[in-house]
Structure formats: C-alpha cells, structure tokens
Amino acid sequence: MAKFDNWRDWMARFGPAEIAGISGSYCGYLSATALGLPSALAAYGAAIGENLGYYGVIAVRDWRGAPISERRVLQVARNLVHDFGIAEALDSLLIRPGLTLASVAAFGAAIGIGAAKIASDVVFYVLAIAFYERRRAREGRR
C-alpha cells in the first residue's frame, strides 16, 4: 500500500496533468454538445478530453525524463500502461462517463463536469497511485 508521505511526489507527477485534464474534460464535453451529440456521448467526450490533456502532460514529461535510447518510446509506453492501465480502463469506459452524465443531469454542465471529474479522480487515483508506487519500489526509487 502506498504511504501518504509521498504526497509531494504525487503532486509533482499528477498536479500539472490534472490542470490539463480538467480543461480537456470541459472542452470535450462542450465540443460534443456543440456538435449536437446526445448527453451520453458528450460524457464520453469529457472522458476523451480529460485523457488527451492528462496523458499529454504525463507522456511529454516522462519522455523528457527518460534516458535517451532506442528503447525510450517503449520504456515510456510501458510505464504509462503499468501505472494507469487498469485504472484508466475502468475510468474511461465506466466511471467517468457515468458520473459525468449523472452530475450534468443533476447540476448542469458548469458544475456537473467538474464534480464528476473530482469524484472519478478519487477512484482513479486509488488504483493509479498503488501501481505507480509499486513500480517505483521495483525500480528502487523510494
């Protein structure tokens, strides 16, 4: 289980990505509704927008931090899949779209998208931090 004394490390890793993710979430949802898509598809638009912003930041930062080699792309991709794979599959396919749809119906788009993002992130981070800490421990970087 991850220790809570690593919160600074988690904030450095996840904080900037979260800022891009929330922006992407609103852009994805609002773009989908502007195209006339139904709310259920707009909820997936929010999840897609979130992923583009969030993983764009994570991938670029990990790319810059990885040793330069022919295996660099594989290393970054493997780490992303390890750290986020299971959490992201559940989040993108079920949790985030479902909570977005319900929150927007209850609170409207302005508050609902953000509320759904926060609620979804709780579930996501329980899994993602556990896998991230597991990889760090395996690599000997405690």
Image (cartoon, rainbow, N blue to C red):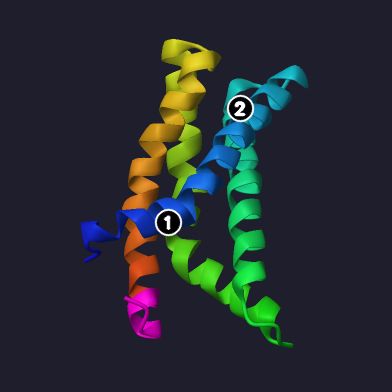
Residue farthest along the bottom direction in this orientation = 70
Query: At which x and y percent is residue 12?
Result: 45, 54
Mark sitting earlier along the chain (1/2): 2
Query: At which x and y percent is residue 103?
Result: 43, 21
Residue at image mark 2: 26
> SS class of the residue under badge 1?
helix
- State the quadrant of the C terminus: bottom left
Left or right: residue 139 versus residue 31 is: left
Left or right: residue 108 versus residue 65 is: left
Q: Please determine whether, in this image, residue 103 is positioned above or below residue 7.
A: above
Between circles 1 and 2, the one closer to the viewer is 2
Kind of residue sitting beneath label 2: Tyr
Residue farthest along the right direction in this orientation = 35
Residue 109, quarter of the rendered image: top right
At horizontal 53% and vertical 73% (from top left) the residue drawn is 79
> SS class of the residue under badge 2?
helix
Query: At which x and y percent is residue 100?
Result: 48, 28
Query: At which x and y percent is residue 113?
Result: 51, 24
Q: Please determine whether, in this image, residue 117 is positioned above or below residue 92.
A: above
* Label 1 neighbour load within 10 Å: few <14, some 14-19, many 20+: many
Name the magenta segment's main secondary structure: helix
Mark 1 vs mark 2, CA separation in Å: 21 Å
At horizontal 54% and vertical 67% (from top left) the residue drawn is 80
Asked whether 39 falls inside the magenta stretch, the response is no
Of residues 15 and 88, which is closer to you in this image?
Answer: 15
At horizontal 66% and vertical 47% (from top left) the residue drawn is 52
Residue at image mark 1: 87
Kind of residue sitting beneath label 1: Ala
Residue 99 visible to the viewer: no
Residue 62, quarter of the rendered image: bottom right
At horizontal 33% and vertical 79% (from top left) the residue drawn is 137
First to last magenta residue range: 135-142
